[in-house]
Structure formats: structure tokens, C-alpha cells
Image: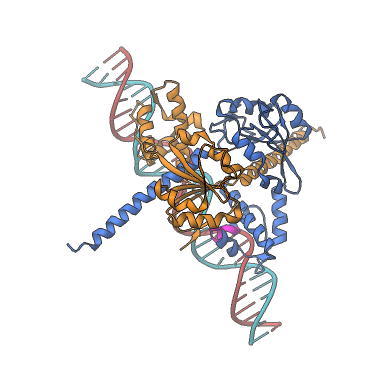
Chain colours: A orange, B blue, C red, D cyan
Amino acid sequence: MKQITKSVIKNSLKRIFLYRACIVRLKLMGVEKVFSYTLANETGVTSDQVRKDFSEFSIKGNKRGGYDINDLLEKMEKLFHRNKDNNIVLIGMGNMGLALSKYSKFVQRHMNIVATFDIDPFKQKMRSGIPVYSMSRLKEIIERFKVKVAILAVPEISAQEVVDELIRHGITGIVNFAPVLLKVPPDVIINNVNLCDELESVIYYVHKQMKVNGLKNLELLYRDMKY
Amino acid sequence: MKQITKSVIKNSLKRIFLYRACIVRLKLMGVEKVFSYTLANETGVTSDQVRKDFSEFSIKGNKRGGYDINDLLEKMEKLFHRNKDNNIVLIGMGNMGLALSKYSKFVQRHMNIVATFDIDPFKQKMRSGIPVYSMSRLKEIIERFKVKVAILAVPEISAQEVVDELIRHGITGIVNFAPVLLKVPPDVIINNVNLCDELESVIYYVHKQMKVNGLKNLELLYRDMKY
DNA sequence: GAAATGATGTGAAACAAATCACAAAAAGCG
DNA sequence: CGCTTTTTGTGATTTGTTTCACATCATTTC
């Protein structure tokens, strides 16, 4: 049964990513152990939260000694399967697809885009170091590289169609940049990244804050008036 | 006082975006009114949730008559300040910046990137329809176009520095694509988009599910064994 | 025009997430 | 060695969010 799959990534997991970024930075600085409140200060959460999150993912520290940074990173790598490489395919070589294909951070984190696809495989052939194939070779490549995860950067009009094909060929996780809600079976993970929504929500809060500040100012004004 | 600002966009607001996308589609199809359960079905939430969300943003419908689509869109436009245009600046014309500068959906939603900036303004001068300025002209442009919101697509190493400058010149909302936690005063809104984390969390869930399915299969196997 | 129906809107209940409070363990110190 | 300090880890509490249940109203039907 196909169904709308909400892109819900648990908050605790998101925070774990925060912690890790922080831990990596600390390691580069030569730090060897870290306390929950250090991570808390660096990431803007409470130290209780840090410990609760770690405990959820069964990450243990040393009473009084804090957390050993190397140990912590190792456990996280295991948790995120970063010891082994992950093969990814990228569908859609428009502007966004092209930028993503060149994004060097993926490789640094052992996520390798092994192939990209487009209905017009010649369009961007020269522009990225990664081969661009026509859609007809999807099945072949996915099977050869045992790919489970795809990045979708196609126009919204064709997104559902492409997703259906991806799933037929064994893809079970998708990061979707097309601004549509995809219908997928319940065992397929979708993570939607909607650039307009991201920008628009910031605009919403900016306007809201301006209103609040406006009111505050008025209040001050009122208070200053000697009636 | 500067502090880490978590990128927390309320869930109810995110859902409002979902509903709107859905409503826009329905309007294009010629539909004139919509019920909470229709939106619910289309977006994968419950109808109660839809009504609660609407109620939070003071959006009212008609008892029995559902919601009038035009009225709904009007109210949402007001809510999101989409009746007036929003001027945006984009900092960093690397791969991602270039792609974002060409992203046509922003304009469709009245969010206009009026200028882009890069330490090397010649790099991408020809590639986008939008002018690329050197960082020295930031203040001038921000003031001239009354810009409040910026998109940050610079390397992580220079992100904090650029943000400090943006805030000095009056920016109060930022969509940040650099994988760092920025320190900003509490009245500045930050929304972080971390591409690696988005991809990595999908990988996490895919692996997790594979483990669960593996277990399930074993269980079936076990059940089928005639001991 | 009264009764039945089908939708909204919202207080109450159930559930989930974050914070608090403190026991337990490790390290330092006299 | 035992006392103090520091930090983790987790049950208990609070806070926040979602779901439930139903009163309310508008429309249709007879």
C-alpha cells in the first residue's frame, strides 16, 4: 500500500548530528575528552538533553571523566554506518542536481554519488566528475553498486514517476528536493528538503519578530509619555 | 549577547506549508472548497490536526461547508506576507549559491534575490541573471533594497564572519547552508539546512529498517520451521 | 420547519519530549 | 582510607503536542 510518508527525522537524531559536528571540531583542536555541558554550550541545548540523547543511542561515558572523544566518534561512526561506504545515486542534473553532484562534503562523509541520471544525459555530461546516465540504465547501476539511497532533484512534475521507478529497483531511502509530497510504501524512508519553505519560514518569523518589536517599542513610547 | 540559535521551525508551521502546497494544487484543478479530511488525506496527517493547526493560526472555516479555497489562500498569503515582495540577498556563489540563484521557485513565491555576493565577484558573473557584487557593497545593497533576509552559501570557514557582517547591516533572518552552528543575537532567526545530515539521517533509517526486516525474516523462518 | 446529516472548533485525555533531581560512580585530596 | 567534588545516567515531574470526543452550527431532506 502506497501512502504519504511524512519526512520525520527524530529530534534526538538531529541533535546527535550537532554533537558529532562539534566533537569532530574538538578533536581537530586536539581535545581528548568532553563533558556533556561542553557539548551543551556549543550546541545550544542543555547538558541533560545531551546525556538523554546519548543514552537513547546507548552511548556511555565515564562517571566524572566525561566522554572520550575517540571512543565517542567510533561509536557514532558505527551508529551511522560510516565505517563502510554508502553508494548513492542522484536523479536530475538541473541546477540543483549539478550543485549536489559537486558537493564535496558527501564524499568526506563516505557518501559516494556513484552515478547521476537525467532524461537528457548529455546536458551536463561535462560539468561534473561523476558520469551522467540516461534513465534507462537506472536498474543496471542501482544493482551493480547495491544502491539503497537516492537523491531526487528532478522537476516536481516528474518526481512521483521517478520515485516509483526507483522503488521498483530497490531504493529504500530518498532525499527529495522536489516540492511535492511523494507517495511511497511504508517501508521507504523519505526526507523532504523544501527550499522555498525553509526560506519562507524564516521570512515568517522575521516579520513576526518585527511586529513584536514594534509593539515593544510602542509600549516603551507609551511608558515614556507623561500624560 | 550572542548565542547559538537552534533552527527550530514549529511543526505546525511546517504543516501549514504542506497544506498550502496542497491547496494551491487543488485551486489549479478548479476546486473551490476543501474539507479538513481532504487536506489530511493529501498530506498524511489527521483531520483533527489540520483543524488544530488552522485554529492556531486563526484560520476559520464554515461549519459544514469546509474551507473556501480562495479565502484560505488569501489568509495564508497575509500570514506569510506574500502580498508584498520580499527582497533577499544571497552570499556565496559557489556551486550551491549558483544553483540557488537560479532556483525559479523563489520568484514564483515573491521571494526575490536582488543581489548575490562573493569574495570573487567575477567568478560567476556570467552564469546567473542576478548581479554578483563584491562583499564591500553589502551594506549599500542591503540598505537600498531594505533586505531583512539572507541566504548563506559560503564555505563553513567564513560563515561566522559573514553572518556577523550581515547582522551589522540589519539582516535579521538567515537560511544557512554552511554546516556550522552560527552564533547570533537572540533576535536573529537562523534556519540551518545541512545537506550531509539530511542524507545521513536517511541512511541511518535505511540501515535500521534493514536490520528490523532482517529480524522479521528470521522470525518468519523460525515460525516456518517444523521442529 | 423539524429532524437528520456532515462539517468545524475546541476542551479534555493521552501521549511524547524536555527538564529536574538525585543516586551512583570515579577522581582527587588531606 | 575516607571525605569531597565532579560528572554521568536515569526515574520522576513538568511541559508540550497530538488525538479524542463532542458541542455547535449550517445545510439538506422529508
Quadrant location of the N terminus of chain B in the rendered image:
top right
Q: Is residue B204 found inside the magenta-colored segment of the image? A: no
Residue B73: x and y, percent? 70, 56
Say which quarter of the image contains residue B160. top right
Q: Residue B155 vs residue A112: left or right? A: right
User: Which range is magenta?
Assistant: B43-51
Q: Residue D15 vs residue B222: left or right? A: right
Say which quarter of the image contains residue A83. top left
Quadrant location of the C terminus of chain B in the rendered image:
bottom left
Task: Give the number of marks.
Answer: 0
Vertical arrangement, residue B211 with respect to residue B157, above or below: below
Looking at the image, which residue is at 55% across and 62% down?
Answer: B41
Could you tell me if residue B60 is visible in this image? yes
Could you tell me if residue A189 is visible in this image? no
Which of B112/A90 is in front? A90
Which of A4/A226 is in front? A4
Residue A66: x and y, percent? 37, 27
Vertical arrangement, residue B13 with respect to residue B219, above or below: above
Vertical arrangement, residue A117 with respect to residue A71, above or below: below
Residue B186: x and y, percent? 61, 32
Secondary structure mostly seen in magenta is helix
Vertical arrangement, residue A4 with respect to residue B83, above or below: below
Q: Residue A86 vs residue A129: left or right? A: left
Residue B40: x and y, percent? 57, 61
